[in-house]
Image: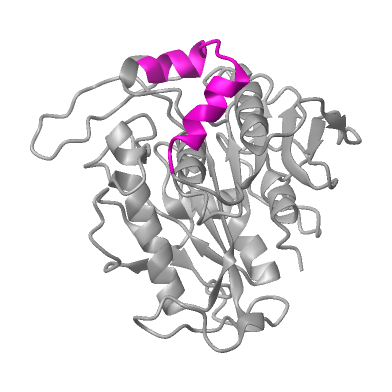
C-alpha cells in the first residue's frame, strides 16, 4: 500500500504527520534548470526554476529557434510579437523535484524540440514535508493569495525576462500538481489558455485534510452545475476559459478515476458545451474522448489509460513520437502524455 503524508504549512509550528497522496521520486540527473530568486513577494514561499531550450547542451533549441529576451521591468512583449514564444508551467507531484518532473515527463526534451519556455515551480519541504503543492488549502489556491499568487508572480517575471506571448501560457501537472493546475486555471483564467491535469482533483473539492482525502478516494456526488459554479466563482472572469486536457490511469489506487469524470463535467459546464463525447480513435487501447463547441473546436478532452496506476504516462525512445523516462510513477505505457498535451496546446510548430 502506498504511503500518504501531509505537512502543515505554517512557519514556526511543529510539523504534523498527516495523510495525503505522494508521488514517488527517483535519482535526479544533472540539473540544467536556472533558479530565479527575485520574482515578487512570493507569499507561497515557492522556488522559481525555469528552463530555456538548449540549456542542457549549451546550444540553441533543436530546430534552431532563438529565444528572444524581454526588457527588464517591462511585462509587455518586445517590438516583434511574431518572435514571442509560448510558456508552459509544469508542476511536479509530491516528493518530486522540479528537475525530476521536467526530465522524466519529457517536458525538457519537448521544449528543446519546439522552442517553448518552461517554468517549473518547486515546493519547499518547509511548506509541506512531502513537497506537495498545497492544493487543498484555501489560502493557497485563491486568486491573489498563497502558492497560486507565487506562481503568477513567476509568470510575470518570465514575461519581463523573455518575450513571451501572453496568449499562449499553459499549465500542467501531476497529482498534487494536477490539482494545483486546475486551481490556477480556475483562479486565473485570464492568464492560461489551456490546462492539463494528470491524476488531478476538481477545483473546489477540498478545503482541508479531511475533504482532500475524501476527494481522492471517494469524491462527493455533485451535479455538473455545482462543480462548474466553483470554478466560475473563483474569479470575475468575463472572457474565455482555458481548454482542458484530462489524463487518468484506470487502475489508479491513489486518486479514484471517478475524479477524472468530475473534472471533465466541471469544465464542460464552465464552457457550456454538450456532455456527449466524440470518441477519437482508441490509441493503443486507451480511450480518448473529445468534447467540441458549436464551431467544432475541442475545448475539453480526456484520456483514460488502460491498466495504468498513479502517475505520468511516458513512452521512452529516440523517435519523434517518444518522450519521457520510465520510473516509479512514470509508467511506460507506450504513450507520452507530455507530447500529446503539447499537441493539444498547439505548441508542435
198 or 245, which lies in front?
Answer: 245
* Residue lying at 84% horizontally and 47% vertically, measured from the top left: 295
Q: Residue furthest front?
A: 238
Q: Position of residue 227 (x, y in %)?
A: 54, 24
Q: Main secondary structure of the magenta part?
A: helix
* Residue lying at 72% horizontally and 33% vertically, measured from the top left: 302
311 or 328, which lies in front?
Answer: 311
Q: Is residue 32 visible?
A: no
In the picture, the quarter occupied by the C terminus is: bottom right
Q: Position of residue 279 (x, y in %)?
A: 87, 31
326 in relation to 165, above or below: above
Q: Position of residue 265 (x, y in %)?
A: 65, 26
Q: Quadrant of residue 64?
A: bottom right
Count of numbered circles on the image: 0
Relative to 230, 5 lies left or right? left
Colour pattern of the rendering: one colour
Q: Which residues are magenta?
A: 211-235
* Residue lying at 80% horizontally and 32% vertically, measured from the top left: 289
In magenta segment, residue 227:
yes
152 in relation to 33, above or below: above
Q: Quadrant of residue 198?
A: top right
Q: Position of residue 348 (x, y in %)?
A: 75, 63
Q: Residue furthest right?
A: 281
33 or 144, which lies in front?
Answer: 144
Q: Is residue 126 visible?
A: yes
Amino acid at each position: 500500500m502506498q504511503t500518504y503524508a501531509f505537512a502543515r504549512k505554517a512557519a514556526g509550528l511543529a510539523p504534523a504527520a498527516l495523510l495525503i497522496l505522494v508521488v514517488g521520486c527517483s535519482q535526479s540527473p544533472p540539473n540544467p534548470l536556472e533558479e530565479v530568486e527575485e520574482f515578487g513577494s512570493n507569499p507561497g514561499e515557492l522556488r522559481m526554476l525555469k528552463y530555456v531550450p538548449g540549456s542542457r547542451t549549451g546550444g540553441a533549441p533543436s530546430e534552431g529557434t532563438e529565444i528572444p529576451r524581454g526588457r527588464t521591468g517591462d511585462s509587455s512583449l518586445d517590438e516583434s510579437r511574431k518572435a514571442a514564444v509560448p510558456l508552459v508551467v509544469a508542476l511536479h507531484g509530491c516528493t518530486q523535484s522540479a528537475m525530476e518532473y521536467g526530465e522524466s515527463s519529457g517536458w525538457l526534451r519537448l521544449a528543446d524540440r519546439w522552442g517553448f519556455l518552461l517554468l517549473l515551480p518547486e515546493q519547499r519541504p518547509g511548506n509541506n514535508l512531502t513537497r506537495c503543492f498545497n492544493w487543498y488549502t484555501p489560502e493557497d489556491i485563491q486568486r491573489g493569495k498563497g502558492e497560486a499568487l507565487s506562481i503568477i508572480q513567476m509568470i510575470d517575471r518570465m514575461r519581463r525576462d523573455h518575450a513571451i506571448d501572453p496568449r499562449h501560457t499553459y499549465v500542467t501537472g501531476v497529482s498534487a500538481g494536477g490539482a494545483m493546475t486546475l486551481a490556477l486555471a480556475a483562479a486565473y483564467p485570464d492568464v492560461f489558455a489551456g490546462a492539463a491535469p494528470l491524476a488531478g482533483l476538481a477545483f473546489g473539492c477540498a478545503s482541508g485534510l479531511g475533504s482532500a482525502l475524501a476527494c481522492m478516494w471517494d469524491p462527493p456526488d455533485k451535479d455538473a452545475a455545482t462543480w462548474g459554479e466553483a470554478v466560475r466563482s473563483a474569479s470575475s472572469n468575463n472572457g474565455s476559459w482555458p481548454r482542458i486536457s484530462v489524463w487518468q490511469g484506470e487502475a489508479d489506487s491513489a486518486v479514484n478515476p471517478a475524479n477524472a469524470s468530475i473534472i471533465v463535467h466541471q469544465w464542460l459546464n464552465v464552457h457550456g458545451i454538450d456532455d456527449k463525447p466524440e470518441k477519437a480513435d482508441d490509441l493503443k487501447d486507451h480511450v480518448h474522448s473529445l468534447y467540441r463547441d458549436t464551431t467544432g473546436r475541442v475545448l475539453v478532452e480526456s484520456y483514460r489509460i488502460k491498466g495504468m496506476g498513479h502517475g505520468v504516462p511516458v513512452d521512452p525512445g529516440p523517435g519523434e513520437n517518444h518522450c519521457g523516462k520510465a520510473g516509479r510513477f512514470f509508467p511506460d505505457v507506450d504513450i507520452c502524455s507530455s507530447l500529446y498535451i503539447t499537441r493539444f496546446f498547439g505548441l508542435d510548430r
